[in-house]
Amino acid sequence: MTEIVSIDFNGNESERLNLDIEGWEGPLDVLLHLARAQKVDLARISILELVEQYLVFIADAKKLRLELAADYLVMAAWLAYLKSCLLLPKEEQEEPSAEELALRLQLRLQRLDAMREAGARLMARDQIGRDVLMRGAPEGVRVVKNASWDCELYDLLKAYGAIKGRQVPREYAVRRRPVFSLEEALDRLESMLGTALDWTVLSSFLPDGITDDDFRRSSVASSFVAALELTRLGKTELSQADSFAPLFLRKRQ
């Protein structure tokens, strides 16, 4: 049993091309199937009337689907081709017979219908952004960390001491140390050099009654700098017999 090629009309009978010509009255697709099965005499079919009724059908259809009109055009063209093959004299040729061509047409129409159905199913699926929405904030990989402490008593005490040390308020007070200034040393040397007539060791010009070691060191340093300054000004003379030997000075004559 051979399957008849059918077209989906969505329940609208006005989209079906029904022919009323000499030798046939009915749908065009059924005529093509019967012609392939050699159950209708194509010699009696008027191709001119078929074309005229096809043009009237296209002109009268107001909301005709373009793919449906294309299918009917292919069917009508194949019918015309099949009839031309019957009318032409039989000659040896390598071209396929009318029956084979009609079978090929049927297979192509079936394949076209399958592609349309697959496309309709594909377009009917849910689409991202229209039917399905993506997550706004996708979750990442969650990492769970478990700390394992390994320390000794010394480490605990050290950490505790460091924390307590940062919490204790610190007060810093600068202790004022006794200092023998350079101005005082200059005044003392100039006043005492007037009474010293010969070379005098530098330690003799230090203040009397020094008991603080810090003040003594400051006095020695300031007196030494004052002696150098007076020598630079040409007021005194310095003398030292050897390295680290006592330093002597006198008023310049």
Image (cartoon, grey):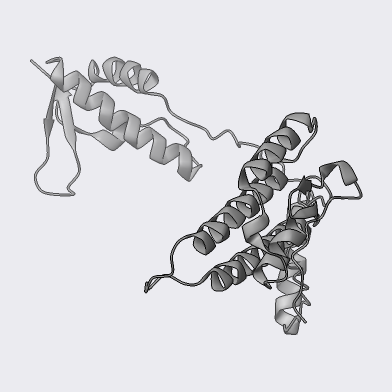
Most distant residue in the right direction: 11
- At a point 78% along the width and 61% down the height, the residue shown is 6
The residue under the point 76% across, 69% down is 4
In the rendered image, residue 105, in percent from the top left (x then y), is placed at: 60, 64
Residue 45 relative to residue 9: left or right: left
When the figure is inspected, residue 124 is found, relative to residue 237, above or below; the finding is below
Q: In which quarter of the image is the N terminus?
A: bottom right
Q: Which residue is drawn at 37% across and 74% down?
A: 92
Q: Which image quadrant for residue 102?
A: bottom right
Vertical position of residue 12 compared to residue 120: above or below? above
The quadrant in which residue 192 appears is top left
* Residue 123 appears in the figure: no
User: Residue 183: image x %, image y %?
Assistant: 37, 17
Residue 222 image offset from top left, x and y in percent: 34, 29
Using residue 210 as the reference point, say whether residue 249 is left or right of it: left
Given residues 152 and 64, the one toward you in this image is 64
Whether residue 128 can be seen here: yes
Residue 221: x, y in percent?
A: 33, 35
